[in-house]
Amino acid sequence: MARTLVIGDIHGGFKALQQVVDRAALQQDDRLIFLGDYVDGWSQTPQVIDYLIELGDRYDCTFILGNHDAWCEEWLSDGLAPQDWLIHGGQATVDSYAGIGPQQRDRHLEFLNRTLPYYEDGHRRLFIHAGFSSIHGPSKEHFPSNFFWDRTLWETALAVNNLIPRGSLYYPKRLMQYDEIFIGHTPTTNYDIDTPMHKCNVWNVDTGAAFLGKISMLDIDTKQYWQSDVVQHFYPDEKGRNK
């Protein structure tokens, strides 16, 4: 039976990405939805993007844009490297492209240019890197950068989970727009949890790969998940991202 598998933040952890893909034992008719932040943190961003392009050639893949991907896209496009990016994982990405030729860089930029701000699957399910602020859903968002920066959607789900019943006049209208929302961006390890978290109708699949966590892959129907080992174990001489 075909599966739809959603994958959380990767942050340059190529070896861990390979491991979680192997552990999920992909089938030819599986659908893969990547929630963004492919880059920044660990030292193998170019290998990650090459591998994602390869997976896109072999499987039905959807790639969402993360905030770190937006930074990297800008750098690959015009060389802009804001200090805030460099100290939050961007320096590792810049270093990883040393020796990478213009043809491969252009290919990676084309890949990032094709990523989506969010994806709706037609079954009242949303896939987005971070969140949105409009009570009418992302199509009515006034600030598109919220798609890869917003944390209030997740914080709202955390705050009202099990406190306000769905359908109540007080239930957050943003959460009423979908039956399920799948996000990354905010590591579950912030809450001392290293597995995907479920609050209200929001599933958070960022399990801290940029720091001391793992890369996670979740079957959106069965909610079975697979994880890599702690990403740092593959890169023992590196520190990963700064908070």
Image (cartoon, rainbow, N blue to C red):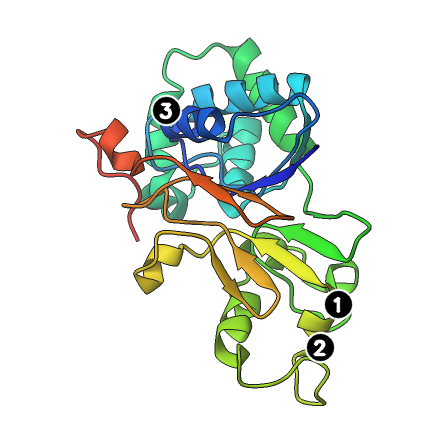
**Residue 47 vs residue 225, the one in the foreground:** 225
- Please state which amino acid type lies under the numbered disc 1: Gln
Crowding at label 1, few (<14), some or many (≥20) Cα neighbours within 10 Å?
some
Q: Which residue is mark 2?
A: 173
Element type at mark 2: helix
Q: Is residue 19 left or right of residue 202?
A: left
Q: Is residue 210 left or right of residue 222?
A: left
Q: Residue at x 50, y 31 (%)?
A: 24
Residue lying at the far bottom of the rendered structure: 169
Q: Quadrant of residue 89?
A: top left
Q: Residue at x 50, y 32 (%)?
A: 75
Q: Earlier in the sequence, mark 1 or mark 3?
A: 3
Q: Position of residue 104 (x, y in %)?
A: 54, 13
- Please state which amino acid type lies under the numbered disc 3: Lys
Residue lying at the far front of the rendered structure: 1
- Distance in Å between CA atoms under marks 3 and 2: 40 Å
Q: Which residue is mark 3?
A: 15
Residue lying at the far right of the rendered structure: 122
Q: Earlier in the sequence, mark 3 or mark 2?
A: 3
Q: Which residue is mark 1?
A: 177
Q: Position of residue 191 (x, y in %)?
A: 34, 64
Q: Residue at x 32, y 45 (%)?
A: 213
- Distance in Å between CA atoms under marks 1 and 2: 7 Å
Query: Which circle marks residue 65 in the picture?
Result: none
Residues under numbered marks 1 and 2 in contact, where contact means CB atoms less than 8 Å apart? yes
Count of numbered circles in the view: 3
Element type at mark 1: helix
- Please state which amino acid type lies under the numbered disc 2: Lys
Q: Residue at x 46, y 53 (%)?
A: 196
From the viewer's perspective, is residue 229 above or below residue 136? above
Q: Position of residue 95 (x, y in %)?
A: 33, 24
